Image (cartoon, helix red, strand yellow):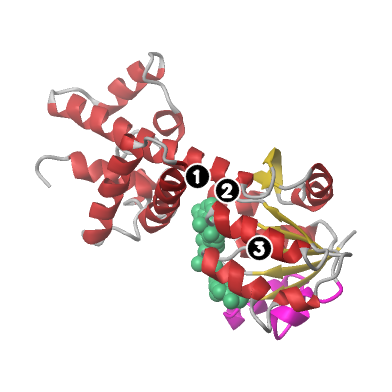
Amino acid sequence: MANIGFIGLGNMGGPMAANLVKAGHAVTVFDLNDSAVSELVEKGANSATTALACAEEKDFVITMLPAGKHVKSIYLDENGVGAALTNNTQVIDCSTIDADTAKFVASELAKRDVSFVDAPVSGGVAGATNGTLTFIVGGSDTEFENAKTVLADMGKNIFHAGDHGAGQVAKICNNMLLAILMAGTSEALQMGIDNGLDAKVLSDIMLQSSGRNWTLELYNPCPNVLENVPSSNDYKGGFMVDLMAKDLGLAMETANSSQSNVPLGRLSQSLYQLMQNQEMGNLDFSSIFKLFNKDS
Ligand code: NAD
């Protein structure tokens, strides 16, 4: 069993750290939010009063933070965690951030002989809670094999996408496609409804036809077609519009730096930004369905 420092105990990091405790690892946690720390201590984790103390003398340091600026600051600030790390520690950053920051943090830590992998996740809060996340890892073969030993206690599928930053690029490609599929599925369903079709009947037809896709099958955006999805619960829970807009921002940065043509990604970004402007940022991203209702 490993000695692990875990920083960032939000919607995702909290249940991920709890699964590491459940698996029998010695887990020390830190978050700016004291109540998130207390919750983990109740589940058997140790607490640290600073990020630095959390990272000292650990086999693994795992971060699950909001954005690139938080990750860069935690590891590389003057009083950052980097100062506490040695070549005995493997850093695993599971946050969704831009690939350039992931590569920069990896190269700065490498100067101190510390290994880093980017390991963003897919699977949402349910996946984090149930230990069924997909991890998409960027790093060397050795770093990947080492990281896998603890990632396996938080997830089901663990992919090696390539070198540092590749995990972030693969994650962002997936989420750009997801945004496009959710918008397209919503548009098609609403056109069917506008022409007198029943949304469930149309969904069943498309599921057995060439329009079949993940959003239609498992995350239908039209209320009351599927049970236990955000659309049937006033679009509460799930994956927020704000987070999808953040990921589309990262996708557009990636596309700009590789000069890729992403017209559909750009269009879906503007649709999600429109939702943020209409104060829908806190709703699940399948609420894009509402944009296509001509009466709204
Ligand atoms: P969250 O806002 O719920 O949690 C972030 C946590 O980080 C908070 O508890 C905050 O207090 C803590 N934090 C921020 N700065 C800190 C610092 N300097 N030191 C210590 N703690 C600090 O976010 P989340 O939903 O858990 O998402 C985390 C990451 O996972 C994001 O990058 C997000 O894009 C990604 N992600 C989220 C989901 C999802 O469904 N929520 C799915 C996949 C990936």
How far apart are the two marked residues, 3 and 2, measured between alpha carbons? 13 Å
Q: What's under tag 3, amino acid-wise?
A: Val
The N terminus lies in which quarter of the figure? bottom right
- Looking at the image, residue 92 sits to the left or right of residue 283; the answer is right
Mark 3 or mark 1, earlier in chain: 3
Residue at x 23%, y 60% (from the top left corner): 277
How far apart are the two marked residues, 3 and 1, measured between alpha carbons? 18 Å
Seen from this angle, which residue lies furthest left?
Answer: 295
Pointer 1 with pointer 2, Cβ within 8 A: yes
Q: Please state the horizontal and vertical placement of residue 241, each as a whole percent of the image.
A: 36, 54
Q: Is residue 179 above or below residue 283?
A: above
Would you call the spot at circle 2 few (<14 residues within 10 Å), some (14-19), or many (20 or more)? many
In the foreground, 113 or 204: 113
Q: Report the residue marked by disc 3.
A: 105
Q: What's under tag 2, amino acid-wise?
A: Gln
Q: Report the residue marked by disc 2.
A: 168
Q: Please state the horizontal and vertical placement of residue 280, each as a whole percent of the image.
A: 28, 58
Q: Secondary structure at mark 3?
A: helix
Would you call the spot at circle 1 few (<14 residues within 10 Å), some (14-19), or many (20 or more)? many
In the foreground, 263 or 43: 263
